[in-house]
């Protein structure tokens, strides 16, 4: 059993706002409303307490790939991100042969059933060759419903999201199929028009996969998918806040038009996250990571990121000057709601899992707790 304790004196970010000199009571694996007499009190004055981070879109870390790594390697990647505050993670795959992806889905579903990951996100192969990014063009295919269904079935109820270029043949029908099976349909790696994107949203698509990246730029005569995704209140927009994928003005534009309740920060991390520069494989493609930026060796396209969510949080509040409450929404509450898990995670409320991140006054990570157990135990005076 995880120990019971009271974390006292921090600025605690709650759904209702930030409480100065607040406290969070941990009782076993859950947050509690009251503490029994004699519960140890840990003084965390001068710090921030925020909910554990939730990453909807993550391909690996710690030198491990969620698409191709062994079970031990995948667990190492998961732990790498936990050390950076991500207490809930959806494992993303990249484009591959359909039979391989189906087998991979079966393997990852076991980790989801064990509670190590929150499910599987299939990014590819149902994407546009015009906007493929770091995906193998030879393995791309149209999103025919039968093909999409094959991957959903292989995931044994653990498929959480599928990214589609919904303008391709079968795209709209596949969106409807995903909705019927309780899987999030995400618009991404797409060459769709504004009108085609609006049709996909009406069919049930609710996520923009890394908005701005791998889609046509916003145009004044042909506004494309970005305008449709930003303006529709049914859509949550993913943003990669690493300083490479987005200019700060693009991030501000997204927050201004979508609002803080419709933005989810993601990592889109690949193997090098938390590991270092060097050569890596992203699916069948070779990637060079230099100064923390991942690009394909052939062609130079950005190939995911080396981001961790603690850095995304710190950048959001120190560089982008977002209110802390907005950053918490983007990193915790919004993705938790999207996953249908807000009753358990995403905020520091009694009855929820004791998933939390302790940050210092400069928003540097000092402690991580997952389900009442310290992943990173704070070193306090």
Image (tube, helix red, strand yellow):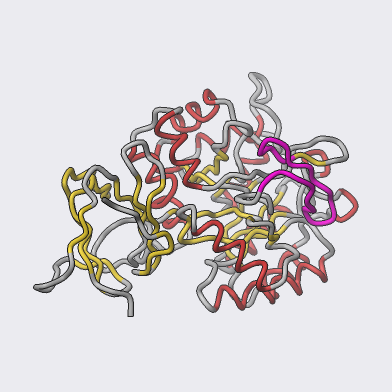
Is there any visible trace of residue 153 in the rendered image?
no
Residue 325 sits in which quadrant? top left
Q: Residue furthest right?
A: 138
Is there any visible trace of residue 255 in the rendered image?
yes
| Of the pair 229 and 30, the residue shown nearer to us | 30
Please determine whether, in this image, residue 268 is positioned above or below residue 80. above
Q: Residue at x 68, y 75 (%)?
A: 107
Can you give x and y, in whole percent of width and height, for residue 271 in the image?
Answer: 69, 54
Q: Main secondary structure of the magenta part?
A: strand
Can you give x and y, in whole percent of width and height, for residue 276 in the image?
Answer: 67, 46
Can you give x and y, in whole percent of width and height, for residue 306 in the image?
Answer: 63, 45
Please determine whether, in this image, residue 219 is positioned above or below residue 338. above
Q: Residue at x 68, y 35 (%)?
A: 291
Q: Which residues are magenta?
A: 276-294
Using residue 107 as the reference point, say whether residue 46 is left or right of it: left
Residue 343 sits in which quadrant? bottom left
Q: Is residue 281 rendered magenta in the image?
A: yes
Q: Is residue 26 rendered magenta in the image?
A: no
| Of the pair 367 and 296, the residue shown nearer to us | 367
Q: Residue at x 71, y 43 (%)?
A: 277
Please determine whether, in this image, residue 372 is positioned above or below residue 228. below
Q: Residue furthest top?
A: 220
Using residue 136 as the reference point, say whether residue 26 is left or right of it: left
Can you give x and y, in whole percent of width and height, for residue 318 in the image?
Answer: 41, 30
Quadrant where the N terminus is found in the figure: bottom left
Using residue 4 as the reference point, say whether residue 178 is left or right of it: right
Using residue 45 as the reference point, say whether residue 165 is left or right of it: right
Q: Residue furthest left?
A: 37
| Of the pair 83 and 159, the residue shown nearer to us | 83
Q: Residue at x 66, y 31 (%)?
A: 224
| Of the pair 313 and 188, the residue shown nearer to us | 313
């Amino acid at each position: 059993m995880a120990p019971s304790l009271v974390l006292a004196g921090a600025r605690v970010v709650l759904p209702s706002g930030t409480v100065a000199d607040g406290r969070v009571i941990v009782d076993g694996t859950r947050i509690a409303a009251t503490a029994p007499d004699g519960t140890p009190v840990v003084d965390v004055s001068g710090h921030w307490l925020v909910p554990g981070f939730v990453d909807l879109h993550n391909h690996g870390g710690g030198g491990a790939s969620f698409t191709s790594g062994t079970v031990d390697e995948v667990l190492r990647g998961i732990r790498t991100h936990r050390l950076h505050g991500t207490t809930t993670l959806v494992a993303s795959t990249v484009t591959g042969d359909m039979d391989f992806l189906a087998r991979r889905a079966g393997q990852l579903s076991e980790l989801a059933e064990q509670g190590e990951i929150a499910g599987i996100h299939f990014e590819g192969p149902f994407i546009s060759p015009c906007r493929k990014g770091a995906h193998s063009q030879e393995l791309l295919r149209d999103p025919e419903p039968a093909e999409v269904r094959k991957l959903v079935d292989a995931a044994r109820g653990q498929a959480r999201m599928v990214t589609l270029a919904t303008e391709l043949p079968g795209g709209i029908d596949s969106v409807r199929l995903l909705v019927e099976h309780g899987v999030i349909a995400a618009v991404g790696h797409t060459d769709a028009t504004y009108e085609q994107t609006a049709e996909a949203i009406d069919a049930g698509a609710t996520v923009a996969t890394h908005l701005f990246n791998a889609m046509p730029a916003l145009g004044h005569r042909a506004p494309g998918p970005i305008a449709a995704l930003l303006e529709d209140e049914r859509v949550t927009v993913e943003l990669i806040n690493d300083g490479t994928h987005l200019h700060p003005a693009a991030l501000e534009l997204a927050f201004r038009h979508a609002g803080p309740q419709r933005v989810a920060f993601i990592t889109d991390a690949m193997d090098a996250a938390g590991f270092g520069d060097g050569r890596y494989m992203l699916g069948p493609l070779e990637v060079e990571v230099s100064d923390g930026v991942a690009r394909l060796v052939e062609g130079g396209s950005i190939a995911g990121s080396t981001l961790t969510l603690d850095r995304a949080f710190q950048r959001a509040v120190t560089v982008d000057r977002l209110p802390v409450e907005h950053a918490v929404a983007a990193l915790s509450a919004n993705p938790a709601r999207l996953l249908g898990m807000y009753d358990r995670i995403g905020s520091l409320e009694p009855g929820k899992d004791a998933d939390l991140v302790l940050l210092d006054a400069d928003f540097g990570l000092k402690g991580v707790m997952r389900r009442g157990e310290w992943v990173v135990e704070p070193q306090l005076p």
